[in-house]
Amino acid sequence: MTVKKKHSTIMPVAIIAGLFFIFGFVTWINGALIPFMKTINELTDAQSYLVATASYISFVIMALPSSYILGKIGYKKGMSLGLFIMAVGALIFIPAAEARTYWFFLLGIFIQGMGMTLLQTAANPYITILGPIESGAKRIAIMGIANKVAGALGSLIFGAILLSGIDGVKEKLESVSLEEKERTLDMMADSVFAPYLIMATVLAFLGVLIKEAQLPNVEVSKPEVSSQGEKEKTSIFQFPHLWLGVLALFAYVGAEVIAGDTIIAYGISLGFTGEEAKFFTTYTLLAMVATYTLGIFLIPKYIKQRTALIISAFLGLIFSIAILNTTGFTSVLFVAALGIANALVWPAIWPLTLNGLGKFTNKGSAMLIMAISGGAIIPPLYGKIVDADKYKLITAGMQEAEATTIAATSSYWILIPCYILILFFAIWGHKIKSWRKGK
């Protein structure tokens, strides 16, 4: 890795941390949006988790185009463009609220996701190769703190705005006329107007500022030809560890989104009020912040990135099994504890996967960005499992409230294969540099 012009990395790290703050704020308000959308649009669990799908599926669609765009216009203009696109997505919430049309809301979320994809495609590889690859996880952990602190703030702010009085609204809807019901839901939908207008304004303002930011250019060194005379690789398909890293990141993002985005709805299904449950996503994110801070201190001086990833995967398995075997607030705490297991997974997978890609680093980064689509697929799958299990239990004669609680808890089994995939990559997968045995 080389850096053109010997600038201090402090300012670039601070700028990228600011962008990660924005990612976190916009991304983690989904935890409050999901139960809010479920109420105002009268959705099933599976339908409500399409909020996560709309946000994360954009990473599949826009990752490679984003790489191309950044190659044409550069980092600064690309990041600025990403912020403006996110501002447009926020503005779409205003007419969506007026129409109270779910698919219109999802369009706004999807467009915001497109902007975030452009920003992430630039920011993640940039911060990874801004210094030694051995300390890549440490720098990304700093980004993670900015991301999750913003997420905790966003979850609290939007939880207070969107979920305030939601329990009273639900009770009211059960006894009012159809016309009164529509008026109540319309008024509730209008509560997104002011916060999303403010969000759009701030994003557009930051888009202007980022164009003036001073960022050094970074390049990746070309891969060396091995002493055994191995030919230089000519395709990203010749790097097995890249594809295993993509699969591990896909599983991780799905698990992380489940931990952050389902916990409020899960708490409500257990009988907690919206006022109480609105804090639950913050528990998950604060657990991640604490572990990120620990990672900054420990990596790479005391533990290697690989070791941190192995420990994280084991903790994920332990906490997932604990969720399935506990009830009430204890179970909620184990969902929040997944933040501890998840915190160092992203920081460790990126450098382990990008290591050795050389001139293919940009394409490898785009593939890892596409893996964020795990957040689009795995959480809605969790929702479908909840709906299916709940239907079976109600059909068998169980009361709806009890069936909802049992289904929401038991469906967390979907986390177990996710952490098994991460564990495989941590122990063996990242070492596989060739499809040929022994290479």
Image (spheres, rainbow, N blue to C red):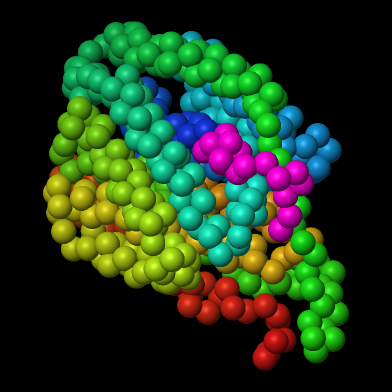
Please say if 164 is above or below 435: above
Q: Residue at x 54, y 36 (%)?
A: 14
* Residue 94 position in % (x across, y down): 51, 13
406 vs 78, left or right, is left
Q: Is residue 424 magenta?
A: no
* Residue 79 position in % (x across, y down): 67, 32
Q: Residue at x 59, y 22 (%)?
A: 206
Q: Residue at x 70, y 80 (%)?
A: 434
Point out the image quarter for the C terminus.
bottom right
221 vs 35, left or right, is right
* Residue 62 position in % (x across, y down): 69, 42
Please say if 333 is above or below 96: below
Q: Nearer the viewer, residue 239 or 59?
A: 239
* Residue 118 position in % (x across, y down): 66, 38
Q: Which portion, as a residue range, is magenta?
A: 1-17
Q: Residue at x 25, y 39 (%)?
A: 280
- Toward which corner of the image does residue 277 lie, by quadrant? top left
124 vs 377, left or right, is right
Q: Nearer the viewer, residue 293 or 427?
A: 293
- Toward which corner of the image does residue 91 lie, by quadrant? top right
The total of numbered circles placed on residues is 0
Q: Is residue 10 magenta?
A: yes
